[in-house]
Amino acid sequence: MPEKIDDLLPTAKDIQKQAALLEAEKAEQYARRAAAAESEKRKLIEKLSKPSGLTEDEKVKLASTVIQRAVRNGLTEVQVYRFPNTLCTDNGRAINQQEKGWEKTLTGIAQEIFQLWSDYLKPRGYRIRYQIIDFPGGVPGDISIVIAWGE
């Protein structure tokens, strides 16, 4: 039995090595997943920072569809978009401070929505609101765009 005990019961040092290897493997998997998620996020932000590619007619029809659906559901406003603060040239600081000219910090689709509102919705009495909706780590995070038509 003494020669089989080593096969059945490894030393504490061997068990510690096995545990360390498993932990290292878990950490490596986590790091790979985190890197993949970060890469996807960068690609999405890159895509959102560029124009949508929709025609003016398509944008107006999309806005009409969203607004009509909200009205049918009894709403007087609707969040039409949510985007990361990195799509603002100042990371959302001017929006957070409600500074005059904050709209000049917008890029990509967020800027397109503002322009659509300015050109077509504002003259028809619609309001728009850009606001920071979360503060991860105490700093501005995602920004919401709300179109409103009620009192």
Image: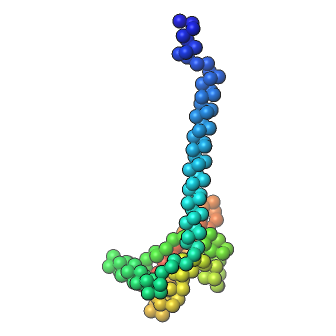
Q: Is residue 151 visible?
A: no
Residue at 55% x, 66% y: name it: 44
| Residue 38, x across and y down, in percent | 59, 58
Q: How is the image coloured?
A: rainbow
When the figure is inspected, residue 25 is found, relative to residue 55, above or below; the finding is above
When the figure is inspected, residue 43 is found, relative to residue 75, above or below; the finding is above
Q: Is residue 17 left or right of residue 44?
A: right
| Residue 92, x across and y down, in percent | 63, 73
Q: Is residue 57 left or right of residue 32?
A: left
Q: Is residue 42 left or right of residue 67?
A: right
Residue at 63% x, 63% y: name it: 138
Identity of the residue furthest to the right in this view: 90
- Check the picture and name the quadrant holding the C terminus: bottom left
Identity of the residue furthest to the top in this view: 1
Q: Is residue 29 visible?
A: yes
Q: Quadrant of residue 40?
A: bottom right
Residue at 55% x, 72% y: name it: 48
Nearer to me, 30 or 101? 30
| Residue 81, x across and y down, in percent | 49, 74
Give the tally of numbered discs: 0
Residue at 35% x, 78% y: name it: 69
Identity of the residue furthest to the left in this view: 72
Nearer to me, 130 or 4? 4
